[in-house]
Amino acid sequence: MARVTIEDCLDHVDNMYELVHVATLRTRQLLHGSHRTVRCKNKDIVTALREIAAGHIAKGEDNDGDTHQT
């Protein structure tokens, strides 16, 4: 399976710092049982990055699907 690169993720967030923030939030959601939007057998952090790179995760999305600016 192809690697997830920072460049792939940066197409969907404004900068590296926001990428870290969004990936951290999404990883915590996955650890607490949130539904995965991509199929992969990787660790939660890699899954979160794959979801961001695929454009499935919006900025500041929380468990309820509501969005807010980060």
Image: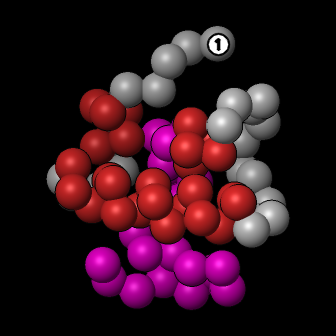
Q: Does the magenta stretch include residue 59?
A: yes
- Residue span colored magenta: 49-70
Q: In this view, does 61 lie to the left or right of 60?
A: right
Q: Is residue 58 magenta?
A: yes
Secondary structure under the numbered disc 1 in the rendered image: loop
Q: Where is residue 32 in the image (x, y as percent from the top left)?
A: 74, 68
Q: Is residue 37 left or right of residue 3?
A: right
**Image quarter (top left, top right, bottom left or bottom right) of the C terminus:** bottom left
Disc 1 crowd, CA 10 A, few/some/many (<14, 14-19, 20+): few
Q: Position of residue 23 (x, y in %)?
A: 45, 55
Amino acid type for the residue under numbered disc 1: Met
Q: Is residue 57 left or right of residue 5?
A: right
Q: Position of residue 46 (x, y in %)?
A: 56, 37
**Image quarter (top left, top right, bottom left or bottom right) of the N terminus:** top right
Q: Which residue is drawn at 66% across and 79% down?
A: 63
Please name whichever residue, 2 or 45, is drawn nearer the observer in this view of the structure.
45
User: In this figure, which residue is indicated by the disc labeled 1?
Assistant: 1
Q: Residue at x 40, y 86 (%)?
A: 68
Question: Quadrant of the rendered structure where residue 39 is?
Answer: top right
Q: Where is residue 5 in the image (x, y as percent from the top left)?
A: 37, 26
Q: Residue at x 47, y 26 (%)?
A: 4
The single residue placed furthest to the top in the displayed view is 1
Question: Quadrant of the rendered structure where residue 60 is?
Answer: bottom left
